[in-house]
Image: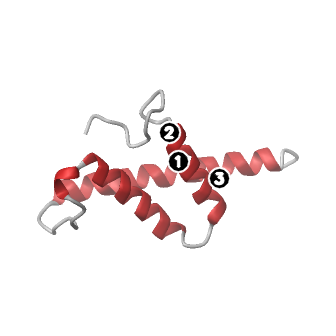
Amino acid sequence: MGSSPFGSGSSEHTPGPKLKRSLIHLSLEGENSKEQLDALADRLYYARHPELQGRKIQEDETDLAKEWMLLRNNIEQEVEQLTEKLFHEQHPEL
């Protein structure tokens, strides 16, 4: 679990350029954001775990489920921060 879910950013909490584009798209999309966040978490998770071949996590695989949720929550936090940043860039008077 040592690799960052955020791509090739400079730190564990800095998204790489590819993920930044996805996060910007998500932050601008609004509708279906939960499904998009889940789909992005799936893509990153299964890239990290190719041995799972895209199969669903089973109930008894609690460590895998926790890892996915942590990844998903980290992505959501990044989207929220980016959304706020973009809003303030577009509305500096606020």
Q: Residue at x 56, y 51 (%)?
A: 23
Spot the residue most to the bottom. Answer: 32
Q: Residue at x 54, y 72 (%)?
A: 32
Residue picked out by circle 2: 15
**What kind of colouring is applied to the model shown?**
secondary structure
Viewer-side label of 2, 3: 2
CB of mark 2 within 8 Å of CB of mark 3? no
Relative image position of residue 38 (x, y in whole percent): 41, 64
Query: Would residue 4 be found to the left or right of residue 30 on screen?
Result: left
Amino acid type, callout 1: Glu
- Asked which secondary structure carries label 3, the reply is helix
Of the pair 89 and 56, the residue shown nearer to us: 56
Query: Would residue 60 be found to the left or right of residue 83 on screen?
Result: left
Spot the residue most to the right. Answer: 93
Relative image position of residue 55 (x, y in whole percent): 21, 65
Of the pair 84 and 54, the residue shown nearer to us: 54
CB of mark 1 within 8 Å of CB of mark 2? yes
Q: How many marks?
A: 3
Q: Which numbered dot is residue 39?
A: none
Q: CA distance from mark 1 to mark 3?
A: 8 Å
Residue picked out by circle 3: 83
Q: Quadrant of the N terminus?
A: top left
Residue picked out by circle 1: 78
Within-10-Å neighbours for mark 1: few <14, some 14–19, many 20+? many
Relative image position of residue 7 (x, y in whole percent): 43, 39
Spot the residue most to the left. Answer: 60
Q: Residue at x 60, y 72 (%)?
A: 31
Res 56 quadrant in image: bottom left
Res 59 quadrant in image: bottom left
Q: CA distance from mark 1 to mark 2?
A: 8 Å
